[in-house]
Image: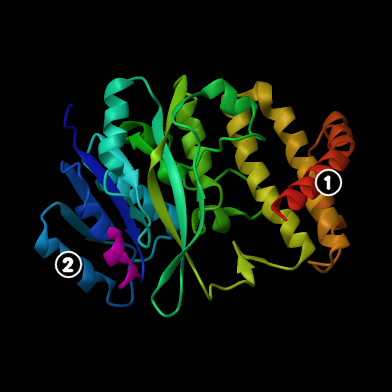
C-alpha cells in the first residue's frame, strides 16, 4: 500500500481534558504517516498547555494558536490551510477515531483513486459530568460505493453524508471551502460561528466533481455529546419557540438550495418540496404536542416566501404523508 501523508485536523477551543482523548486516538492510529494539526482558537483556559505537552511527546503533532477567536468554521479553514498532507481528516477536539480508521480509509483511496471521499460509521457518546462516557447511538451504512447522482436525487433516503467521518483530499477541501452561505436573512453567525450545515454543503460541493463516494462500516468516528449542554439556545435560536424551530429548518434549506442551485439544479425544486412538507409536519407536531410555544405563521411565511406556486402546492399535498411517516416511525420505535 502507498504511504501518503494524512493530516488529522483538530480545531480546538477550551477543551483541556477532552482533547487528550482526541490526541491519544490520533497517536494510536495503525497508519503512522500522519500529522496532527491542532489550531487553538484563542482558548482562555489550560488547553494550550495540554497540547504543548503532547507536542513535546510526538513531533507529528503541530500546534498553532490564533491571536483572536475566529469562530468555528473559519478555524476549520485554518486547520486545512496549515495542513501539509495529501489527505485530510477533520476531528473535533472532543472526538476520537477508532485505531485503524486512517489505515482502512487509505486502502479505499488506493483501490479507488477516483473516489470523492471515504466515509465511515458514527458512534456517539454522552460525556457525563462525572467524567464517564456512555454510548448514545451508532449510525453506519453498508460498505460500498454510492453514486453522486443517487445521493443528490434521494436526499430523503439513507445514506446521509456524515461529513465529520469523511476523509478527503486536501486540494478538494481547499477548492470548495466556504465559511458561510450567501443569504439575506442574517444567518451568517449560525453558519460561520456555529457551523450550521456548512460541512454538508462543502462535501456536497466536492462530490459534484466526482462520480461516487465510498462508505466503510467497520471503522468509526466517535463523536461526543455533553450532558448539561444548554438546551435553550442553538445557533442563536431558542428551543421551544415554534418560530425558531422553523428558522432552524430554513437555515438548512438555504444551505442545500445553494448547493442544488449551483451544482445540481435538476433536483432543486424536488428538494424544496421535500423540505417544505417536512417543515410543515414538524410544525404540526409542535402545535399538537405543545412542545413549542408561540405562533408559526410569520416564520412559515418567510420560509415559503420564495417558493413557486408548484413548490408550495406540492409541499402541502405531501405534508400529510410526512405526518403519517413520522407516526409510523414513532410506533416502530415503541
List x then y, in percent, for residue 272. Answer: 73, 35
Q: Position of residue 306 (x, y in %)?
A: 78, 39
The secondary structure type at the circle numbered 1 is helix
Q: Classify residue 311 as left or right of residue 123.
A: right
Res 66 seen here: no
Residue placed most toward the observer, 216 or 54:
216
Q: Give the dominant element type of the magenta stretch: helix, strand or loop.
A: helix
> Which residue position is annotated with label 2?
52
Q: Residue at x 27, y 47 (%)?
A: 8
Q: Residues within 10 Å of mark 2 (few under 14, many from 20)?
A: some
Q: Residues within 10 Å of mark 1 (few under 14, many from 20)?
A: some
Tell me whether the residue at label 2 lies in contact with that at label 1, contact meaning CB atoms closer than 8 angstroms. no
In-front residue for pair 54/301: 54
Residue 53, percent from left and from top? 15, 69
Q: Residue furthest bottom?
A: 130
Q: Is residue 113 magenta?
A: no
Q: Earlier in the sequence, mark 2 or mark 1?
A: 2
Residue at horizontal 86 percent and vertical 32 percent from the top: 314
Which residue lies at the image location 44% right of the left edge and 43% below the top edge? 121
* Residue under numbered circle 1: 323
Is residue 18 found inside the magenta-colored segment of the image? Answer: yes
- Front residue (pair 102, 57): 102
Q: Is residue 172 left or right of residue 135?
A: left
Q: Which mark is residue 303?
A: none
Relative to the observer, which residue lies in front, 219 or 17? 219
Q: Secondary structure at mark 2?
A: helix
Query: From the image, which quarter does the N terminus lie in?
Result: top left
Visible residue check, residue 292 = yes
Tally the numbered discs.
2
Magenta range? 15-22
Give the left or right position of residue 196, taking residue 1 as reference: right
Residue 2 in percent (x, y) is at 17, 27
Amino acid at each position: 500500500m502507498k504511504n501518503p501523508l494524512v493530516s488529522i485536523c483538530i480545531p480546538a477551543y477550551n477543551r483541556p481534558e477532552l482533547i487528550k482523548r482526541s490526541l491519544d486516538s490520533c497517536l494510536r492510529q495503525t497508519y503512522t504517516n500522519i500529522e496532527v494539526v491542532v489550531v487553538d482558537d484563542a482558548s482562555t483556559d489550560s488547553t494550550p498547555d495540554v497540547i504543548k505537552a503532547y507536542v513535546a511527546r510526538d513531533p507529528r503533532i503541530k500546534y498553532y494558536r490564533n491571536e483572536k477567536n475566529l469562530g468555528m468554521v473559519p478555524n476549520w479553514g485554518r486547520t486545512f490551510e496549515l495542513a501539509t498532507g495529501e489527505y485530510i481528516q477533520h476531528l473535533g477536539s472532543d472526538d476520537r477515531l477508532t485505531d485503524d480508521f486512517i489505515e482502512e480509509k487509505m486502502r479505499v483511496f488506493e483501490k479507488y483513486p477516483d473516489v470523492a471521499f471515504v466515509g465511515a460509521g458514527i458512534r456517539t457518546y454522552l460525556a457525563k459530568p462525572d467524567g464517564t462516557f456512555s454510548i448514545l447511538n451508532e449510525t453506519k451504512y453498508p460498505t460500498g460505493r454510492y453514486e453522486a447522482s443517487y445521493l443528490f436525487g434521494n436526499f430523503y433516503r439513507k445514506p446521509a453524508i456524515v461529513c465529520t467521518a469523511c476523509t478527503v483530499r486536501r486540494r478538494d477541501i481547499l477548492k470548495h471551502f466556504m465559511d458561510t452561505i450567501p443569504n439575506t436573512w442574517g444567518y451568517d453567525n449560525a453558519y460561520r460561528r456555529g457551523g450550521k450545515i456548512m460541512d454538508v454543503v462543502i462535501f456536497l460541493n466536492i462530490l459534484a466533481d466526482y462520480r461516487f463516494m465510498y462508505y466503510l462500516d467497520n471503522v468509526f468516528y466517535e463523536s461526543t455529546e455533553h450532558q448539561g449542554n444548554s438546551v435553550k439556545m442553538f445557533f442563536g435560536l431558542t428551543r421551544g419557540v415554534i418560530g425558531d424551530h422553523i428558522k432552524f429548518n430554513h437555515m438548512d434549506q438555504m444551505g442545500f438550495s445553494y448547493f442544488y442551485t449551483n451544482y445540481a439544479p435538476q433536483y432543486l425544486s424536488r428538494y424544496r418540496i421535500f423540505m417544505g412538507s417536512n417543515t410543515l409536519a414538524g410544525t404540526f407536531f409542535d402545535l399538537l404536542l405543545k412542545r413549542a410555544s408561540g405562533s408559526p405563521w410569520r416564520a412559515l411565511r418567510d420560509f415559503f416566501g420564495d417558493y413557486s406556486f408548484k413548490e408550495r402546492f406540492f409541499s402541502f399535498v405531501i405534508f400529510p404523508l410526512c405526518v403519517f411517516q413520522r407516526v409510523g416511525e414513532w410506533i416502530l420505535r415503541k
